[in-house]
Image (tube, rainbow, N blue to C red):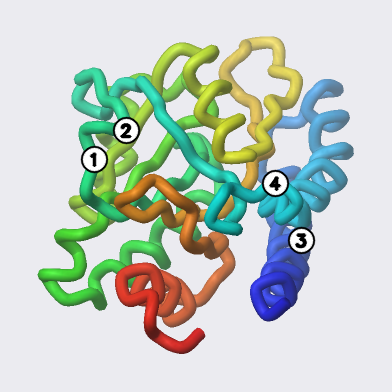
Amino acid sequence: MRHRKALVVASIVVCAFAALIVWRSFFNAPQSESSVQAFATSAATVLHQDDSLIDESAMNESGRPAIGGAFQLIDHNGLPRTDADYSGKFLVVYFGYTFCPDICPTGLRSFTRALEKLKPDEIKQIQPLFISVDPNRDTPEELKTFVGQYHPSLVGLTGASRDIESVAKKYKVFFQLHKKDTDGQYYLVDHSSIFYIINPRGAYCGHFTHASSVEDMLAALRQALYPSMTK
């Protein structure tokens, strides 16, 4: 019950923040008929996406939400990567895109500060992953520049659209491209904004959002590392 209440509160914060982002983006972006239509529907799309992400009706055998799974992607150095490459570690998985105007940078900056507060032996147990939901633009080169702005342990992952869709489905992640402008280069991608924590056994064990405070992110990470801690 406490977990559900916390998620509801987080969702309300996400909704308010998302509405602000859409408003700011509209007045800062090139305005064409297609972009106006995209932004007109953006708020409604973003607002519904986070309040049903942790589907508690879909549980695994341990009684936790069935989130996560195997993947085959390409990292920001152009090397093939699978979930097996990070076995034995806690994964913190976030889906976003490098052209994201506010939500991804906001969340990743806070997440970086939370990681910096961990002890060296704690950070060694965690592998942060940023999985692109915009593989057409997010090449390994783009990802390398992007993840280089945040914690040095952050790994950017991209891949073929079908591979991104496959892993997104396993993480119950929503994303949707808006109609592109005439030049095909400027567009937004609505997407879930949750950092999923997966334990070394491959099971979901917690989450937080881009709007969570650094302290709450740190608490969630330590709760995963030390399950006996009181929530």
Residue type, label 2:
Asp
Q: Which residue is mark 3?
A: 15
Q: Nearer the viewer, mark 1 or mark 4?
A: 4
**Camera-side residue of 231 and 155:** 231
Q: Nearer the viewer, mark 1 or mark 3?
A: 1
Secondary-structure class at tag 2 = helix
* Identity of the residue drawn at 46% across and 35% down: 69
Alpha carbon separation for disc pair 1 and 3: 33 Å
* Identity of the residue drawn at 67% across and 75% down: 6
Q: From the image, which quarter does the N terminus lie in?
A: bottom right
Residue type, label 1:
Tyr
Numbered tag placed on residue 86 in the rendering? 1
Left or right? Give the position of 158 relative to 136: left
Q: Which residue is mark 2?
A: 83
Q: Earlier in the sequence, mark 1 or mark 4?
A: 4
Q: Which residue is mark 4?
A: 58
Callout 2: 10 Å neighbours few (<14), some, many (20+)? some
Q: Earlier in the sequence, mark 1 or mark 3?
A: 3
* Identity of the residue drawn at 56% across and 50% down: 61
Could you say where residue 198 lies in the image, as x and y percent from the top left? 41, 52
Q: Nearer the viewer, mark 3 or mark 2?
A: 2
* Identity of the residue drawn at 75% across and 43% down: 26
Whether pointer 1 and pointer 4 mark residues with C-beta atoms closer than 8 Å, the reply is no
Alpha carbon separation for disc pair 2 and 4: 22 Å
Q: Earlier in the sequence, mark 3 or mark 4?
A: 3
Answer yes or no: is residue 72 visible. yes
Residue type, label 4:
Ala
Secondary-structure class at tag 4 = loop
